Image (cartoon, coloured by chain):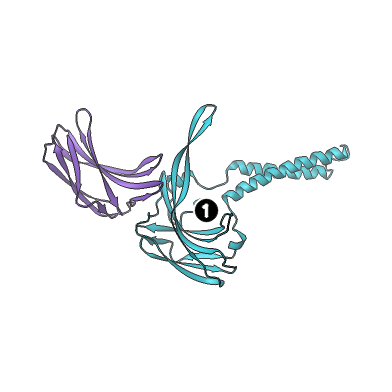
Chain colours: A cyan, B purple
Amino acid sequence: MTDFPHLPPGHDPGAQSLRNRMGVPLLWWFVGLVGLGMFLGGVFIVAGGRGPGYNFWEERLGGTFFGGMGLLCAWVAYSQYRKFRPRAHARMRGMSLVADSDEKQRGEAISLTIDHNASAEGLEVGLVCVELFDLRATANTRAGIVYVRETNQKTAYEQWQAVEPPAGEQVLDFEIPREAPCSYEGDCLSYAWRVSARVVRKLRSDPRIDHPIWVRP
Amino acid sequence: MKLEIELQSDHVGPGGDVAGQVNVTEGGKSRSLTLNLSFYEQTRDYLVAAYSTGFVVHEGEVRQGESYEFSFTLPSEAPTSAKTKNGKLYWELEVKSDEPGVDTHSRRRLEVG
């Protein structure tokens, strides 16, 4: 996965995207490695690796606790990794979504081809424009009020079509509205277009696969 | 002093020509009149001038009833104007009179798209 999953190849990120570049901070790599080390150390102690000179039950108890804490650290680090690099949902595996072109003009039609081998129940294909906008958030600290710049995102435009039940390849056509915003990479405001396939689920997040496109004026 | 920007068309595409004139509705002492073209990104809390350029349309005193024509071409890669619920992108023309004391400004939006 790229650092800028909302951008198709050949388009440079703007200042806002660079500020919010996706990646796993060094801290979580460190926490993960330390956690793994602690877990292996715990297993070593529980297995009696330090020799017969130590109390058997203290070694078991201490090693289990130490290894358990290590496992917890490693799990937290892994969940942070998955937060930045989400794994495709089981129902989306083996599914592909392709657009006839990664670049389109407003007012043009775009054909999306979805190839799915699983059940199409709740499966939809769509054309989406997301606005990424910076707001100033406030936080009260001991030193006083601190202002933090944060990037929020909302859907500016979306159009979805249900996929018909038979598995296999299907082509769905969409039209990019003339009055919709064009793709734009800015400093405090950006517009990102994508085509998506999602499985609509009640009371749960919808798993989806995305394919970024660029919309020209 | 009072200035007003008049455009031949409020709507232009990227790479298109923008033509118009600065009308003086109330004259006064001025060293120069500068026309600035700026592109802004705006959200609820931020306003960023992402692009700006300017040129002088007149030098010296301005008199009521005078008008100064201008024309220029927008960059072909100029981003288009947009307005959504949480932000907007817009182009703006501003004429500024450099004068003793407080400068006079007049602004006008330009729809690009």
Q: Quadrant location of the N terminus of chain B?
A: top left
Q: Is the residue A166 above or below the residue B50 in the image?
A: below
Left-right relation of A192 to A167: left
Left-right relation of A60 to A103: right
The residue sitting at 40% across, 54% down in the picture is A183
Q: Is the residue A17 above or below the residue A90 in the image?
A: above
The residue sitting at 43% across, 61% down in the picture is A102
Q: Position of residue A85 (x, y in %)?
A: 58, 52
Inspect the image, locate mark 1, and give the three-letter code of the amino acid beneath it: Thr
Q: Position of residue A97 (x, y in %)?
A: 51, 64
* Image quadrant assignment for residue A55: top right
Q: Is residue A37 visible?
A: no
Image mark count: 1
Q: Is the residue B45 above or below the residue A181 in the image?
A: above
Q: Quadrant location of the C terminus of chain B?
A: bottom left
The residue that disc 1 covers is A2
Q: Position of residue B111 (x, y in %)?
A: 28, 51
**Please, which chain is the residue tagged with disc 1 on?**
A
* Image quadrant assignment for residue A61: top right
The residue sitting at 37% across, 41% down in the picture is B48
Which element carries disc 1, helix, strand or loop?
Answer: loop
Q: Residues within 10 Å of mark 1 (few under 14, many from 20)?
A: few
Q: Residue furthest front?
A: A202
Left-right relation of B1 to A56: left
Judge by depth and name the residue closer to the eye, A66 or A206.
A206
Q: Position of residue A28 (x, y in %)?
A: 62, 43
